[in-house]
Amino acid sequence: MEIDNRKTIISWALYDWANSAFATTVMAAFFPIFFKKFWSAGVDPVESTAKLGLANSIAGMVVALCAPVLGAIADKGSAKKKFLLFFAFIGIVMTASLYMVAQGDWVLAIAVYVLATIGFSGGNIFYDSLLTAVASEKRMDFVSALGFSLGYLGGGILFAFNVWMTLKPAMFGFADAGAAVRFSFLSVAIWWALFSIPVFLFVREPAPQKSGTTGAVILAGLRQLRRTFEEIRHLRVIFLFLIAYWLYIDGVDTIIRMALDYGMSIGFNSDDLILALLITQFVGFPSAIAFGYLGGRIGTKRSIYIAIGVYLCVTIYASFITRAYEFYLLAIVIGLVQGGIQALSRSLFAKMIPPDKSGEFFGFYNLIGKFSVVAGPVFLGVTALLVRSMGYSSDIASRVSITSIAVLFVAGAILLSFVDEEAGKKAARHL
């Protein structure tokens, strides 16, 4: 297939537009709020935070354990798009199913949410791995950033519409805001399905070097995975990057998934928090593109350092905020760097791996990312519970827990300084 083809690049990037509706409307906004006020109504805020953190951790662990194996199999069978379709289907169906979960049934809500998150996260393994098939090394920073920027815009547009429905439910024929929120889950599923079509129609992956039965492809994938483990001593740079990425993206993902829950725990109104999330989405759209250009001008690593530094300041300042406008200010600052750190981390990794093993290597990449989701929310929730058990209020416990995330950004930045991008590329060429 033709690398750097405009139609192919846009079709690939539109999948970010499609599934980011889940990340925004469901994962970051309405599920945490609805879980606290509808499915887990009357439960102590710290306890519901711990339950939500556990749900995110379960989903992350399932994907993490399967990612490298599935990626290796997808490489050998040229099946990245097939796996992407499989996980997207799970995510879409489970997201739509949230519409039917009854009030108070927090166990079923978590079960459905976990499956939807597995679909979302699992699909991203194979979506990310297709980056090496659509963009050359020279354009990877820009193309990766384009995907995230369209994700912020698309997710933001649908989220804005869903917020409008919840604020004016009668205008749309809903009995109340709760009914509008439940319909929003259904709208995300439809949006996700509709805008996923281009990636399946217009993005092609290289044909497998050898054809064979399904069983043979699976065995070949497993053998390749074993060889990669054996060759890990030759991949020191990639290994070091993955550890650094694990640490700092742990902080990023924890903030994404738990920010609204944190805001509610310290007493902010849910309407203020939703507006802050909208601000992040629309600031993130041009900012992600800007980071793509910045990576090309000053270097990908240096640009990531800028984003990490901003996040470090955010986690410290967040523990002191008391007014809504301060939460809006944080939303703007996070929007400036969130898409950038995600996009440039993805493109930096893609530059240092063999293109013909992108599924397998992005399996490891997503394994690391998902294990950060396992650790981060649980770390935040357990810290809050420990502080609360010492006799402090829920407000103080929540503030201490958000500050503790700063150590992840510091450690990640230190390890990233030892990553030699050129050495990583050289090692990848010899695999």
Image: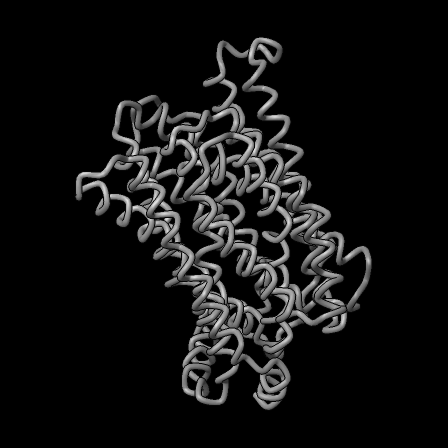
Q: Is residue 58 visible?
A: no
Q: Is residue 359 depicted above or below 290 in this figure?
A: below
Foreground residue among 414 and 271: 414
- Residue at x-position 70% and y-position 62%: 204
- Residue at x-position 56% and y-position 51%: 85
Q: In which quarter of the image is residue 62?
A: bottom left
Q: Quadrant of residue 429?
A: bottom right
Please state the horizontal and vertical placement of residue 363, each as a whole percent of the image: 49, 67
- Residue at x-position 58% and y-position 75%: 211
Quadrant into which the N terminus falls: bottom right
Q: Is residue 52 depicted above or below 39 in this figure?
A: below
Q: Can residue 389 be seen in this view?
A: yes
Q: Farthest right residue?
A: 6
Please state the horizontal and vertical placement of residue 76, each as a whole percent of the image: 54, 74
Foreground residue among 203 and 146: 146
- Residue at x-position 36% and y-position 49%: 377
Quadrant into which the C terminus falls: bottom right
Q: Which colour scheme is used?
A: one colour
Please state the horizontal and vertical placement of residue 73, each as a whole percent of the image: 49, 70
190 left or right of 40 in image:
right
